[in-house]
């Protein structure tokens, strides 16, 4: 049982035929080759698979690919514009917001959604927003600092 | 996940037609946060999914006859952030804010959450003490069901296989009332509660006597539970802290928790009494803060005159 879906992924129109039981994360990774998005817990808890649907963050491991039909998806690959990294990516590099890197695509995408809503978030706002993105390396201090200072890289 | 047929009806009428066509092997899906996990784990294996995502008329939050009318497809995040909900029934926005993480709240729908009927969920105790009702629609017509009578067992409700939740109605608090929801989270902030408690208290004009009290708990039985004996112990009584403690003790008889990784049954029973007392105290605080805010907001208006 297959279904043809049309969506916009990182600004580009995409048409793809998927089995109805395809998850969005598998569609992104295996059908479209966008392997930046990672699968961690597979039950919507860890945040590694965070992508944006119409600007709002969701767990791509819990969404069926058919949910994206007619919608706009943003993955970590879509943050850089014309070869230039997004301010939040620059800030993660500058302030050491990652160690092993497996949670980083989800962290960066979630942080982008936060900064779109609140350009200069407080530490409490960052902690509240990023609560669902787990990191086993950094102890979160560097992630919080990176997000707090991301506005420095905005033009 | 096993393969399945995926249907995308555009109207409630079409949903009913699909339900008739695919029968009890079909499952309705909206946000998918609960159902997709259950399908991944092969706890449910529907032969077809009928998506409510494209159905018109199930969205939105509005005010109708003094109550909030929340469409079944409204997300948890929409309830949490709606200026109307925050103004009219702040307790409801606050309760939905406690569900999981923003990512899940962006997907999970109000109707889907209620139909899922996991007794560990946050919204049901609050909705019960607020006197909320749901509207369910079938090909034969629709009916309004008090939340109080909605849940029957683990993941079981009074909904019939051909019924869908179209709306949730939440009345405003009566005058001289305060409300609170409190969630005991010994593990992580996005977890299900070990015990949760919601309370609404209504006092007389002089604010000395309880004229009405409503208490409900989550995570301590096969359904959310209304604590009627504890309520009765307070109704008509003067507001005193010993009274709150004694009433809260009575919830231990009403609850029937199971031991799991969030705590032993005995511990949850103890905590049920503790958190009901706290919910009652917070509901009284909510009322006294509101009356303070009410006095403050009147002051500038008087000056304008």
Image (cartoon, rainbow, N blue to C red):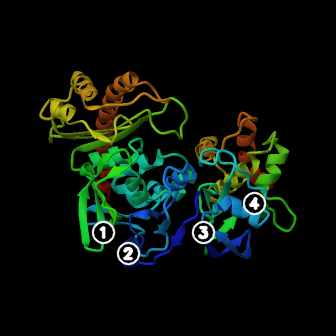
- Residue B228 in sight: yes
Left or right of B134 in this view: A135: right
**Which chain does the residue under circle 3 lie in?**
A
x and y percent of residue A89 in the render?
A: 80, 53
Q: Are marks 4 and 1 on the same chain?
A: no
- Residue A155 in sight: no
**Which chain does the residue under circle 1 lie in?**
B
As measured in the structure, the alpha-carbon distance from the residue carrying label 3 to the one carrying label 2 is 20 Å
Q: Earlier in the sequence, mark 1 or mark 2?
A: 2
Q: Are marks 4 and 2 on the same chain?
A: no
Q: Which structural element holds mark 4?
A: helix
As measured in the structure, the alpha-carbon distance from the residue carrying label 4 to the one carrying label 2 is 35 Å
Return the mark for residue A66. 3
Q: Residues within 10 Å of mark 2 (few under 14, many from 20)?
A: some
Which residue, given by chain and number where applicable, does mark 4 sit on? A29
**Which chain does the residue under circle 4 lie in?**
A
Q: Which structural element holds mark 2?
A: helix
Q: Residue at x 21, y 24 (%)?
A: B243
Left or right of B269 in this view: B244: left
Return the mark for residue B137. 1
Which residue, given by chain and number where applicable, does mark 2 sit on? B12
Left or right of B142 in this view: B81: right
Left or right of A80 in this view: B104: left
CB atoms of marks 4 and 2 within 8 Å? no
> Toward which corner of the image does residue A19 lie, by quadrant?
bottom right
Q: Earlier in the sequence, mark 4 or mark 3?
A: 4
As measured in the structure, the alpha-carbon distance from the residue carrying label 1 to the one carrying label 2 is 8 Å
As measured in the structure, the alpha-carbon distance from the residue carrying label 4 to the one carrying label 1 is 39 Å
Q: Which structural element holds mark 1?
A: strand
B139 over B40 or under it: above or below:
below
């Amino acid at each position: 049982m297959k279904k043809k879906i049309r969506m916009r992924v990182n600004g580009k129109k995409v048409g793809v035929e998927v089995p109805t039981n395809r998850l969005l994360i598998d569609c992104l990774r295996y059908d479209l080759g966008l392997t930046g998005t990672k699968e961690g817990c597979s039950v919507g808890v860890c945040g590694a698979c965070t992508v944006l649907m119409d600007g709002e963050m969701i767990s791509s491991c819990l969404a069926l690919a058919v949910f994206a039909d007619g919608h706009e998806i943003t993955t970590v690959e879509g943050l850089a514009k014309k070869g230039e990294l997004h301010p939040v990516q620059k800030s993660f590099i500058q302030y050491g917001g990652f160690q092993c890197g497996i949670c980083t695509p989800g962290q960066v995408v979630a942080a982008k959604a936060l900064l779109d809503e609140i350009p200069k978030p407080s530490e409490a706002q960052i902690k509240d927003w990023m609560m669902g993105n787990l990191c086993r390396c950094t102890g979160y201090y560097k992630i919080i600092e990176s997000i707090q200072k991301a506005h420095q890289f905005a033009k | 996940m096993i393969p399945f047929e995926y249907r995308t009806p555009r109207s409630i009428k079409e949903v009913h037609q699909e339900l008739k066509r695919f029968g009890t092997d079909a499952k309705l899906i909206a946000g998918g946060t609960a159902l997709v996990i259950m399908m991944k784990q092969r706890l449910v294996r529907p032969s077809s999914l009928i998506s409510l995502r494209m159905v018109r008329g199930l969205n939105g939050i509005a005010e109708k006859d003094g109550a909030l009318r929340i469409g079944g497809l409204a997300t948890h995040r929409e309830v949490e952030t709606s200026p109307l909900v925050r103004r009219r029934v702040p307790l409801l926005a606050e309760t939905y804010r406690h569900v999981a993480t923003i990512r899940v709240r962006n997907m999970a729908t109000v109707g889907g959450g209620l139909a899922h009927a996991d007794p560990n969920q946050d919204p049901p105790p609050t909705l019960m003490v607020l006197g909320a009702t749901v509207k369910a629609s079938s090909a034969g017509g629709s009916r309004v069901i008090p939340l109080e009578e909605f849940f029957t067992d683990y993941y079981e409700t009074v909904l019939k296989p051909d019924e869908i939740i179209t709306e949730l109605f939440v009345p405003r608090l009566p005058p001289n009332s305060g409300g609170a929801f409190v969630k005991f989270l010994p593990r992580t902030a996005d977890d299900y509660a070990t015990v949760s408690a919601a309370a609404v208290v209504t006092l007389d004009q002089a604010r000395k006597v309880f004229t009405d009290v409503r208490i409900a708990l989550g995570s301590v039985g096969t359904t959310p539970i209304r604590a009627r004996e504890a309520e009765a112990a307070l109704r008509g009584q003067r507001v005193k802290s010993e009274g709150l403690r004694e009433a809260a003790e009575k919830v231990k008889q009403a609850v029937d928790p199971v031991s799991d990784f969030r705590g032993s049954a005995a511990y949850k029973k103890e905590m049920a009494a503790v958190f009901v007392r706290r919910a009652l105290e917070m509901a009284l605080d909510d009322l006294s803060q509101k009356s303070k805010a009410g006095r403050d907001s009147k002051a500038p208006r008087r000056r304008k005159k």
